[in-house]
Image (cartoon, rainbow, N blue to C red):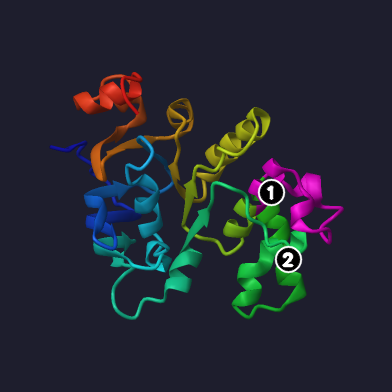
Amino acid sequence: MSSISSQKFEAILSTHQLNAYFGDFQAVKDVNIKIEPNTITALIGPSGCGKSTFLRCLNRMHEEVPGAHMSGEVLLRGKDIYSRGQDPVRIRRKIGMVFQKPNPFPSLSIFENVVIGLTLAGIKDPDLLSQTAEEALKHAALWNEVKDKLKQPGTSLSGGQQQRLCIARALAVHPPVILMDEPTSALDPVSTAKIEELVLELKKEVTVVMVTHNMQQAARVSDRTGFFLSGELIEYDHSSTLFTVPQDKRTEQYITGRFG
């Protein structure tokens, strides 16, 4: 029986009986969750428990995998992103994604990497593109480090800077929600700390849902935490509660290191 705290708020993002499959294999099972605006939600659990698959269902990236499909609902501000007529590309502008490994486009400059979402949408106004790039890079805490080398390749930056560049790229199209799939697992401790500071700052403007293997990180930065096991959302509560007085014995066993 899932132990999910009662949530009496207007969710910006929610799921209803979400199931995800790879062919016949069911990776995510009947997940119901409500995510409050301007919060950070961490998803934890052992490898292969379904948390990254669940995350990819939240902006229709799961369906890009051959043979993958889902059932149930994902609601962004009350509207099902899987309903007929919804354009997956537009959905992904509203629900951005930052991946585990920084992935700036290698053939594009720092500037071009940031504004790629706008240029693909047909926006050509150089003043608007410049203003957007500066704002996004400032929000990603990267502007002061790159403002004099915007024409250099995005791949010329360090790993931590590349990850902040990818965050700036996601921010440039002004999404209400950003998904992060282990955004610091490939980074050194100093870069990790910068990303964590950035995420805490970002929640003033966007809602963040983050998969992490690092429970200390989840406890440090998140408002709420969901614990996944074998495709199920076992427990979802305020992080301060889940990490100190978990309601489900499996959650307690995981966070105290008895399995996982």
Q: Residue at x 34, y 67 (%)?
A: 67
Q: Is residue 51 above or below residue 168?
A: above
Between 126 and 82, the one nearer to me in the picture: 82
Tag shown at residue 91: none
* N-term mark: 2 or 1: 2
Q: Quadrant of the C terminus?
A: top left
In which quarter of the view is residue 103 placed? bottom right
Give residue 247's position: percent from left, percent from top. 20, 26
Amino acid of disc 2? Glu
105 is within the stretch colored magenta: no
Give residue 61's position: percent from left, percent from top. 42, 63
**Outermost front residue:** 24
Q: Residue at x 51, y 45 (%)?
A: 204
Give residue 56's position: percent from left, percent from top. 40, 56
143 is within the stretch colored magenta: yes
Q: CA distance from mark 2 to mark 1?
A: 13 Å
Amino acid of disc 1? Gln
Where disc 2 sits, the SS reads helix
Give residue 183's position: percent from left, percent from top. 54, 43
In this rendering, position of residue 147 left or right of residue 87: right
Magenta part of the protein: which range?
A: 141-165
In which quarter of the view is residue 123 placed? bottom right
Tag shown at residue 112: 2
Name the residue tied to disc 1: 162
Where disc 1 sits, the SS reads helix
Between 243 and 215, the one nearer to me in the picture: 215
Q: Residue at x 76, y 71 (%)?
A: 127
Q: Residue at x 30, y 27 (%)?
A: 242
Q: Is residue 243 above or below residue 63?
A: above
In this rendering, position of residue 23 left or right of residue 104: left
**Outermost right residue:** 148
Of tags 2 and 1, the one toward the viewer is 1
